[in-house]
């Protein structure tokens, strides 16, 4: 039977801490691993410090109203999609393909009924159509409260 750890007689063997034999050319690789492990162990100590010690996060009690005001200013210029919905309908593709100029499509909304105002697809208000300088607009008649919005989402 041959010994698994047998090496040619001209190559000296090195012993590692685990008791395994290592060739001399592998010694450099072990030094690299030892250095990497030492570095990792040093970093683990640094990363286990609390965030407060590192000064990364501030306690909420230290946040001032001016900080909050500046945070709100950052989002004021973000564009959103506002849609006013007259009504909806479902139509078969066969009937959709038959539509031509002058065709009338019946919607589920009633004449004089308030129209829905949606922001990014979420209902936020209802209103009525107005015309100002030959342009359509909407006069808001009812603003949906945040609690009402949440209640409608749960349905």
Image (cartoon, rainbow, N blue to C red):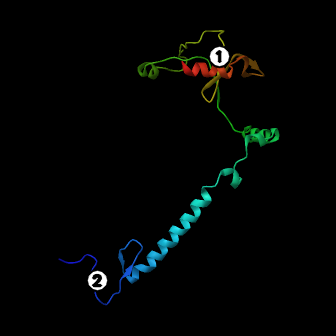
Reading the image, the residue beneath label 2 is: 7
Q: Measuring 60% from the left and 57% from the top, which residue is drawn there?
A: 47
Q: Quadrant of residue 65?
A: top right
Determine which quarter of the picture holds residue 8: bottom left
Q: Is residue 15 above or below residue 66?
A: below
What residue lies at 70% left-to-right and 48% top-to-bottom? Answer: 57
**Which of 110/50 is in front?**
50
Residue 81 is left or right of residue 76, and the answer is left
Mark 2 vs mark 1, CA separation in Å: 88 Å
* Location of residue 58 in the rendering, given as x and y in whole percent from the top left corner: 73, 46
Nearest the viewer among 58 and 15 is 15
Task: Kindly identify which residue carries mark 1.
Answer: 115
The numbered mark, 2 or 1, whose residue comes first in the sequence reads 2
* Above or below for 64 versus 145: below
Q: Which of 127 and 107 is in front in this view?
A: 127
Q: In this view, does 155 lie to the left or right of 24?
A: right
Location of residue 82 by image quarter: top right
* Numbered label tally: 2
The quarter of the image holding the C terminus is top right
In the picture as drawn, the residue positioned furthest to the bottom comes out as 10
In depth, the one of 21 and 51 nearer the eye is 21
Give the left or right position of residue 102, taking residue 78 as reference. Answer: left
Q: Farthest right residue? A: 66
Where residue 88 appears, as percent x and y from the top left, is 55, 18
Q: Report x, y in % for residue 25.
A: 40, 82
Judge the density around disc 2: few (<14), some (14-19), many (≥20) Cα neighbours within 10 Å: few
Secondary structure category for the residue under label 2: loop
Q: How crowded is mark 1: few (under 14 residues within 10 Å), some or many (20 or more)?
A: many
């Amino acid at each position: 039977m041959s010994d698994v750890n047998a090496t040619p007689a001209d190559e000296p063997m090195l012993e590692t801490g685990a008791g395994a034999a290592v060739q001399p050319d592998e010694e450099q690789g072990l030094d690299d691993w030892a250095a990497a492990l030492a570095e990792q162990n040093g970093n683990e100590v640094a990363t286990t410090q609390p965030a407060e010690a590192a000064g990364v996060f501030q306690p909420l009690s230290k946040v001032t109203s001016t900080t909050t005001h500046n945070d709100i200013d950052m989002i004021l210029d973000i564009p959103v999609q506002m849609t006013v919905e007259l009504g909806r309908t479902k139509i078969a593709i066969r009937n959709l393909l038959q539509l031509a100029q002058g065709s009338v499509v019946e919607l589920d909304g009633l004449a004089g009924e308030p129209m829905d105002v949606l922001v990014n697809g979420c209902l936020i208000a209802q209103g009525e159509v107005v015309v100002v300088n030959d342009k359509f607009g909407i006069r808001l008649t009812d603003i949906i409260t945040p609690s009402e919005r949440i209640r409608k989402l749960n349905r």
